[in-house]
Image (tube, grey):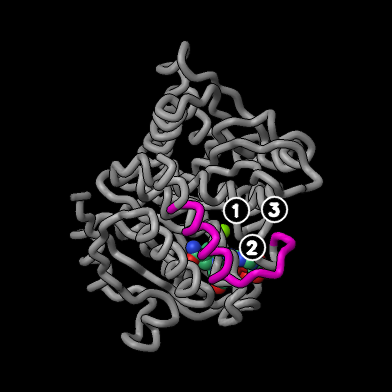
C-alpha cells in the first residue's frame, strides 16, 4: 500500500483553482495517496474571512508542513498586503527555488536553458517598509541581513551539490548598493569558500545578467539572488523557455515546503478554462520529490515532456488550442502509460 501523505491545498484565486485542480488530478493519476486539506487564500479568503491569509490558515500550514498552492491576486498600489509575502514570512519559507529548463518540443527564439533560480524569500525591499516622509517624497527600505543572506547562500550551494550542479552565480548590484548588496555578496563568498572543490562560484551584476540570459542562458547554472532580483529574473527566465505557464517553483523553510508556480493569478484568462497547468503540475512533481516519492517525480516530469514533444494538446499560451482539461488529460494518460511500462 503506498504511503498516505497529508497535504494542504490552497487553490488561491484567478486561474489558481483551475491549475491546482489539474495538478491534483495528475498526482492522483500518478498513484499518489494524498489526504488533502483545502484552505482559503487570496480573494476567496478576503470574501469569506475578510483576510487574504487568515491566521487559522497559517496555523494549519504549520501543522501540515507541505502545501500545494495556487496564485493569489494582490491589488496594485493600495489594498491588502500580498498573501504570498505574508505567507513566506509567517512560515519563514526562506528559499524560493525555480528550475527553468528548455521544454522539449517547444521552439523559442532562445538557446537551451537549464538553470535553477534560488531566491531569498523573506526580506529585501519586500519588507514593505514604505514611508511618505514629506509630500511627494517616499522612502522604501531595503533590508538585507547577514543571517538571511548566509542562510540562502548555504541553501544555494547545498542545493547545487545535491542536484549535481556545477556552479553558483551570485547576482547583485553592489557597485551601487555597496553596503546592502555588498553584505549579500560577502555572505555568498564566505559560503563559496566552504565548497571550493565541489561547486564553483562567480558573480554577475543583475542588469548584465538579464542581457546575458537572453543572449546565452546556457552559460548559467544556479543563480543566487536577493528577493526582488529573484522575482524579476524568474519571469525573464520563464520567457526564455516559452512563458509563465511552464515554470514551477517551491518555497522551502526549515521543515516546510510550499509548492507553487512562478506565475500569478492571470486575471486576463481566469475562468476561461485555457490556463496552462504545466507550471503547477511540475510544482506538484517537485512536491513529490520533497515527499520522498521519487518515482512519481520522474514520471510526472517525463509525462509532461512527452506531451509537449507530441504537441497534441497544448494550451494557447504555448501555441495550441487545447483547454486546461485536455492538456491535463494528456499528461495523465502519459503518466499512466509510463506506470504501465515501468
Ligand atoms: P501573471 O503571472 O498572473 O500573468 C502574466 C501573463 O502571463 C498574463 O498574460 C497571463 O495570462 C500569462 N500567464 C500566467 N500564467 C499562465 C498560465 N498558467 N497559463 C497561461 N498563461 C499564463 O502576472 P500578472 O498579470 O502580473 O499578475 C496577476 C496577479 O497575480 C497580480 O495580482 C499579482 O500580484 C499576482 N501574482 C501572484 C503570485 C503568486 O500568488 N504566487 C505570483 C505572481 C503574481
Ligand atoms: Mg513574480
Q: Is residue 42 above or below residue 111?
A: below
Mark 3 or mark 1, which is nearer to you?
Answer: 1
Q: Quick one: SS at disc 1? A: helix
Q: Are marks 2 and 1 in contact (CB under 8 Å)?
A: yes
Label 3: few (<14), some or many (≥20) within 10 Å?
Answer: many
Give the distance between the C-alpha atoms of the residues marked 3 and 2, in whole angstroms.
16 Å
Left/right of residue 210 with respect to residue 223 in the rendered view: right
Left/right of residue 89 with respect to residue 136 in the rendered view: left
Residue 338, percent from left and from top: 45, 46
- N-terminal of the pair, mark 3 or mark 1, is 3
Q: Which quadrant does ligand 1 occupy?
A: bottom right
Dividing the picture into quadrants, the one containing residue 206 is: top right
- For the residue pair 155 and 328, the one nearer the viewer reads as 328
The residue beneath circle 2 is 313
Q: Residue at x 47, y 77 (%)?
A: 13
Left/right of residue 36 with respect to residue 302 in the rendered view: left
- N-terminal of the pair, mark 2 or mark 1, is 1
The residue beneath circle 1 is 307
Q: Residue at x 71, y 49 (%)?
A: 106
Q: Residue at x 46, y 66 (%)?
A: 22
- N-terminal of the pair, mark 3 or mark 2, is 3
Q: Main secondary structure of the magenta part?
A: helix
Dividing the picture into quadrants, the one containing residue 159 is: top left
Residue 237, percent from left and from top: 65, 47
- Checking the image for residue 269, the label placed there is none
The residue beneath circle 3 is 242
Residue range highlighted in magenta: 318-336
Mark 3 or mark 2, which is nearer to you?
Answer: 2
- For the residue pair 203 and 285, the one nearer the viewer reads as 285
Q: Is residue 132 visible?
A: no
Label 2: few (<14), some or many (≥20) within 10 Å?
Answer: many
Amino acid at each position: 500500500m503506498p504511503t498516505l501523505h497529508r497535504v494542504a491545498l490552497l487553490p488561491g484565486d484567478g486561474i489558481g483553482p483551475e491549475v491546482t485542480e489539474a495538478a491534483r488530478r495528475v498526482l492522483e493519476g500518478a498513484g499518489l495517496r494524498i489526504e488533502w486539506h483545502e484552505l482559503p487564500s487570496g480573494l476567496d479568503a478576503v470574501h469569506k474571512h475578510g483576510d487574504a491569509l487568515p491566521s487559522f490558515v497559517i496555523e494549519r500550514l504549520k501543522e501540515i508542513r507541505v502545501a500545494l498552492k495556487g496564485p493569489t491576486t494582490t491589488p496594485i498600489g493600495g489594498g491588502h498586503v500580498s498573501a504570498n509575502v505574508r505567507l513566506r514570512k509567517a512560515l519563514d519559507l526562506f528559499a524560493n527555488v525555480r528550475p527553468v529548463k528548455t521544454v522539449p518540443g517547444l521552439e523559442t527564439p532562445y538557446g537551451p536553458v537549464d538553470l535553477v533560480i534560488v531566491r531569498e524569500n523573506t526580506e529585501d525591499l519586500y519588507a514593505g517598509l514604505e514611508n511618505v516622509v514629506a509630500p511627494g517624497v517616499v522612502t522604501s527600505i531595503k533590508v538585507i541581513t547577514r543571517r538571511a543572506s548566509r542562510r540562502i547562500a548555504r541553501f544555494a550551494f547545498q542545493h547545487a551539490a545535491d542536484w549535481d550542479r556545477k556552479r553558483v552565480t551570485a547576482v547583485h548590484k553592489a557597485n551601487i548598493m555597496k553596503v546592502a548588496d555588498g553584505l549579500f555578496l560577502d555572505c555568498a563568498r564566505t559560503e563559496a569558500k566552504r565548497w571550493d572543490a565541489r561547486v564553483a562560484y562567480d558573480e554577475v551584476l543583475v542588469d548584465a545578467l538579464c542581457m546575458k540570459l537572453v543572449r546565452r542562458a546556457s552559460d548559467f547554472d544556479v543563480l543566487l539572488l536577493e528577493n526582488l532580483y529573484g522575482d524579476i529574473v524568474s519571469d525573464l527566465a520563464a520567457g526564455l523557455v516559452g512563458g509563465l505557464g511552464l515554470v514551477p517553483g517551491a518555497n522551502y523553510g526549515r521543515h516546510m515546503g510550499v509548492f507553487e508556480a512562478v506565475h500569478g493569478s492571470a486575471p486576463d484568462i481566469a475562468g476561461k478554462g485555457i490556463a496552462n497547468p504545466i507550471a503547477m503540475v511540475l510544482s506538484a512533481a517537485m512536491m513529490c520529490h520533497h515527499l520522498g516519492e521519487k518515482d512519481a517525480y520522474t514520471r510526472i516530469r517525463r509525462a509532461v515532456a512527452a506531451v509537449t514533444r507530441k504537441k497534441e494538446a497544448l494550451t494557447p499560451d504555448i501555441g495550441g488550442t487545447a483547454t486546461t482539461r485536455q492538456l491535463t488529460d494528456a499528461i495523465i494518460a502519459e503518466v499512466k502509460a509510463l506506470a504501465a511500462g515501468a
